[in-house]
Image (tube, grey):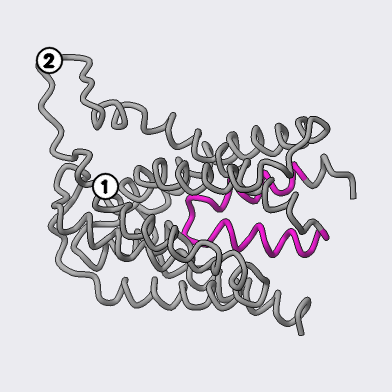
Amino acid sequence: MNEYLIAVIQGIVEGLTEFLPVSSTGHLILTGELLHFTGDKAKTFEVVIQLGAILAVAILYWKRVLQLLGWKRDRSEPKSQLNLIHIVLAIMPALVLGLIFHKSIKLYLFSPQTVLLGLAAGGIFMIWAEKRQREVRAHDLDDLSYKQAFGIGLAQCLALWPGFSRSGATIAGGLLVGTNHKAAADFSFLIAIPMMVAASGYDILKSYNDLSADDIGFFAIGFVVSFIVALLAVVSFLRLLEKVELTPFAYYRFLVAGLFWFFVLR
């Protein structure tokens, strides 16, 4: 298959799934298997197009990002209760564990078989979180406590297993510590920016030798497509969360895992 078509397909997959609770990494690994696009170049490409999705969220949440950095357009604006301590508490657990187990995760967990397990396990966790949701005490980002932020950060550690889904784990974790769906999703997207920049930056530093001038066009197409699709996907998902819960996404995960196992791996 033409590599530029592969770039478009994978860019669409990344943009659609990065911030939905269905696991972008898992989908990229599975579609890469179907497209016969695997190996070091594929892994580096996945990291680059993730940056496109990150840029989309940074643009959508630019006002909140600037507030976290201490910038206010108007001095009369009320001070945001959400601050950088919330962000640090939420990203540190997964960052620390990711650094410790990075090599093992890359070596043993990035396969179609392990992704299918992650999809199923993540779906079960999401359904369980919906059923065990605590009384809502945080209706928006500024209601979040430090304890809740840290609890969401602990849940995010589950997403170190490819296929589990970072957004699925954090949104479900938010429900378990007493946030509503919207606040959990907003916080999940916000902490994705430093989390994914750190993870992607680390991966690029370790694999930059796989990049060459001949790949610039290929990588650029994937990056742009991922960015555009992620913009649309995040906005649509936030609207959808007002009408549905996480359970339909869990059933979708079960369906994908079952179909891929039956038709491809069996």
Foreground: disc 2 or disc 1:
1
What is the chief secondary structure element of the magenta stretch? helix
Q: In which quarter of the image is residue 15?
A: top right
Q: Residue at x 52, y 46 (%)?
A: 202
The residue identified by callout 2 is 75
Tag 2: Cα neighbours inside 10 Å, few (<14), some, or many (≥20)? Answer: few
C-alpha span from label 2 to label 1: 25 Å
Q: Residue at x 22, y 54 (%)?
A: 149
Q: Residue at x 66, y 71 (%)?
A: 111
Q: Give the range drawn in magenta.
A: 7-36
- Farthest residue, direction bottom: 266
Q: As shown in the figure, which amino acid type bears the numbered disc 2?
A: Arg
Provide residue 20's location: percent of width, then percent of height: 49, 54
Q: Is residue 110 shown left or right of residue 8?
A: left
Q: Is residue 178 above or below residue 75?
A: below
Q: Residue at x 39, y 46 (%)?
A: 189
Q: What mark, if any, has residue 88 been given in the picture?
A: 1
Provide residue 255's location: percent of width, then percent of height: 61, 74
Figure quadrant of the C terminus: bottom right
Provide residue 178's location: percent of width, then percent of height: 18, 62
Q: Which label's residue is closer to the chain start, 2 or 1?
A: 2
Tag 1: Cα neighbours inside 10 Å, few (<14), some, or many (≥20)? Answer: some
SS type, badge 1: helix
Q: Is residue 261 above or below residue 64?
A: below
Q: Quadrant of residue 49?
A: top right
- Farthest residue, direction top: 74
Q: Check if residue 15 falls in the magenta segment.
A: yes
Q: Check if residue 99 falls in the magenta segment.
A: no
Q: Is residue 211 shown left or right of residue 227?
A: right
